[in-house]
Each structure stands twice: as C-alpha cells, then as structure tokens.
Amino acid sequence: MRALATALIFVMVGGCSAGNFAPVVDIYGQEPRTSKVTAGTHEVRGGETLYSIAWRYGWDYRELARANRIPAPYTIYPGQRISLALKAPSSGTSSASSSTSKPAPKAQDKPTSKPAPAKQQKTPAPKPSATASAGSTVGPVSWRWPAGGQVVETFSSDNHGRKGIAISGKTNSPVVAAADGRVVYRGSGLTGYGNLLILKHSDRWLSAYAHNDKMLVKEGDAVKAGQQIAAMGATGTFRTQLHFEIRKDGKPVDPLTYLPKK
C-alpha cells in the first residue's frame, strides 16, 4: 500500500508540473496544438531560432517570417516579439510601430543562433531508387532511416496523437541525419522533446530528432544523410527512444510514407 501511495503521488506531481509549460506543441498530444496557432505573440528567449518558434506553433517558418517582416537569414533577438496573427502586417504599417519590430539590441545582447540558410536552388526531379535500403526518393528529398531500432509508436493525425514515430534503441545508439541538410535548431526549449535537433533539408522540408542523450552537431552545421548527429537517450520522456518527425510546409506528415520500407 505504501508503494502504491508513493506511485500515485509521483504521477500527480508529474502531471501538475507538466501544466507549467505553455504554450507548446506536445508530441504526445497532451496539448491540442496540432493546428497552427494564429493569435497572440511569442517573446523570443535566448537559444531560440525562428525555426524552433515556427515548429512550436505549427507554422511554416517562411510564412512566419513574412508575417513578421523578418528577412533571410531570419535573425531574431531575445526580447523580440513574434506575432502569431495569421495575416502579415499591412504594407502601410510602420515597422517602428509594429509589435514585432526588432528592438535595438543592448550592448550585452546577442542575436539568437543564426544558421546559414540552405542554398536557394531548385531541386531536380528525383530518379527512382534502385534499392530501398539506401534511401527513399519519394518527394523532393531522399530519406533514410534515422535509427536502426524498431518502430514502437506510429504517426497519428488525431489531435491527441503522435506527430511522428518512435524508434526504440539503447542509450547511445547512433542517431543519423535522415537526409542531407543543415542544423537550424539545437536545444531543449520545447517541452516534451528533451534534447532536440531540427534539420532543414529544403525550403519545404524539415525533420526533427528528439530525446537525444548527446547532440553531436551545432546550429549551422551542414550534414549528410547517414551522418551521426546524436546519441539516443531518454531526455524529456520515459524510455530510451528516438522521436522522429518530418514536416512539409510546417505541417507534420507520416514519416513511414517517406522512409524506405524495411
């Protein structure tokens, strides 16, 4: 009985503490943030990038940048307010009066991480893959598996469903880039993801790797498909696993649709 009571108290405390983090996209669907948030503002904190903020609120980073008049390479500053309103400010609105205008940085302020943007070029139409083991050429990005374990949870389009897949593994099992790309976020600021990496593969495609024990790349790094970028862990979750997501134009898609068949 004492053990049961202790367990119940632990669960209650854990559930209460989770409510202190808001607003975020919860990968387990505990917060109904599966659709785009189109009201309010977000105040930039140190370590955030426009990509991570767009990921948090279900936006395509390009659309969020246009709505806030943030030009490439999308430099943002701590204390800057990012509007989540759906429509961009009218052309007649002065940037000085806009709530999203960039504040003059203080001497000690530094811009948040500014990864070099991927080259803007048209992606040639992919050729059919000769084998499924190396990678899939469905869509404009050639995808490969980010880890070697088994899929233990699958994608769900429900409001309370997982927006990616969970791959099992052991602590420090390698996590590799699922496609060529560039690191646009490295941190632990999104509740439920633990140590998280976000890669940009093209203007339309991003992927995310969550719960890492160690992260082996930094923001701005160019990575190749199959390159180890992290070691699997259990940060932000209850077991050792990789939570893997693919997003197209800011919207989660089922990774199993794009990954090669095992």
Image (spheres, rainbow, N blue to C red):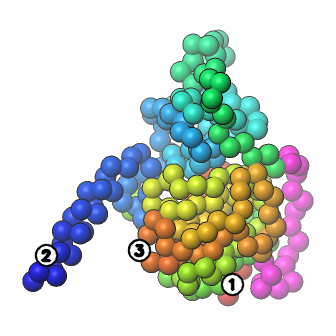
From the top left corner, tell me how far across and down residue 131 is, in percent.
Answer: 82, 85
Q: Nearer the viewer, residue 225 or 124?
A: 225
Q: Which residue position holds label 3?
A: 238
Q: Residue at x 67, y 27 (%)?
A: 69
Q: Nearer the viewer, mark 1 or mark 2?
A: 2
* Precedes in sequence: disc 1 or disc 2: 2
* Precedes in sequence: disc 1 or disc 3: 3
Q: Tag 2: Cα neighbours inside 10 Å, few (<14), some, or many (≥20)? A: few
On the rendered structure, is 44 left or right of 39? right
Q: Quarter of the image for the C terminus: give it.
A: bottom right
User: Would you say the magenta stretch is mainly helix, strand or loop?
Assistant: loop
3D distance between C-alphas at marks 3 and 2 = 20 Å
Q: Which residue position holds label 1?
A: 261
Assess whether mark 2 and mark 1 are in contact (beta carbons under 8 angstroms): no
From the top left corner, tell me how far across and down residue 32 is, in percent.
Answer: 39, 53
Q: Quarter of the image for the N terminus: give it.
A: bottom left
From the top left corner, tell me how far across and down residue 70 is, in percent.
Answer: 68, 30
Residue numbers of the magenta segment: 119-136
Q: Is residue 67 above or below residue 6?
A: above
Q: Which mark is residue 248?
A: none
From the top left corner, tell me how far across and down residue 237 is, in percent.
Answer: 44, 69
On the rendered structure, is 214 left or right of 158? right
Q: Secondary structure at mark 2?
A: helix
- Can you tell which quarter of the image residue 159 is in? bottom left
* Precedes in sequence: disc 3 or disc 2: 2
Q: Residue at x 56, y 66 (%)?
A: 210
Q: Which mark is residue 5?
A: 2
Q: Is residue 162 magenta?
A: no
3D distance between C-alphas at marks 1 and 2 = 45 Å
Q: Is residue 189 above or below residue 13?
A: above
